[in-house]
Image (cartoon, rainbow, N blue to C red):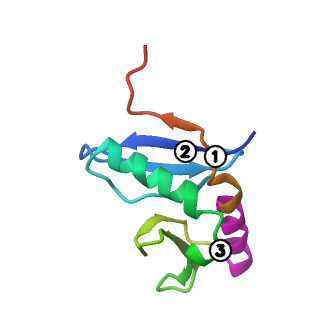
Amino acid sequence: MSGWYEVSKSSSGQFRFVLKAANAETILTSELYTTHSAAANGIASVQVNSPLDERYERKATKDGHPYFNLRAANHEIVGSSEAYSSDVAMEKGIASVKANGPTKVIKDKTLPVL
């Protein structure tokens, strides 16, 4: 099984998505979007940009933990990782986003359950 996107609504009514790996671990988290369609556009951007190494911005938190941002062609951040314990772990996270990002599977938690 491959990864998937999960769309949800925040307590403030905004939308976000996460990219999950096959083991259900969150590997990328989006910003908050004011509309569902904007979140869908964010997913489309991750699907296109995630395979491209040059789109990953490797950074470190103030206390030195590595993390990364995935940027679109226009340099906007479309998703961010968690903070990792090492550079090696961060690179594994990037590899997972590259592998799972192109997936077309989207689980939308904002839709009513029938």
Identified at 65% across, 44% down, the residue is 24
Q: Tell me the quarter of the picture where residue 98 sits.
A: bottom right
Tell me which secondary structure the magenta stretch mostly adopts. helix
Q: Residue at x 54, y 38 (%)?
A: 106
Q: Measure the C-alpha gap from mark 1 to mark 2.
A: 8 Å
Considering only order in the chain, which callout, 1 or 3, is on the residue closer to the N terminus? 3
Q: Give the extent of the magenta segment.
A: 86-97
- Classify the position of the C terminus by image quarter: top left
Q: Which of the numbered marks, if any, corresponds to residue 5?
A: 2
Looking at the rendering, which quadrant does residue 104 occupy?
Answer: top right
**On screen, residue 98 above or below 113:** below
Towards the viewer: 101 or 93: 101
Distance CA(mark 3)–CA(mark 1): 17 Å
Camera-side residue of 91 and 36: 36
Q: Are marks 1 and 2 in contact (CB under 8 Å)?
A: yes
Q: Which element carries disc 3, helix, strand or loop?
A: helix
Mark 3, residue position: 53
In the picture provided, is 92 more to the left or to the right than 77?
A: right
Q: Is residue 74 left or right of residue 87?
A: left
Query: Label 1 sits on what residue type?
Result: Thr
Give yes or no for contact between labels 3 and 1 (Cβ–Cβ under 8 Å). no
Q: Position of residue 14 (x, y in %)?
A: 28, 47
Badge number at residue 103: 1
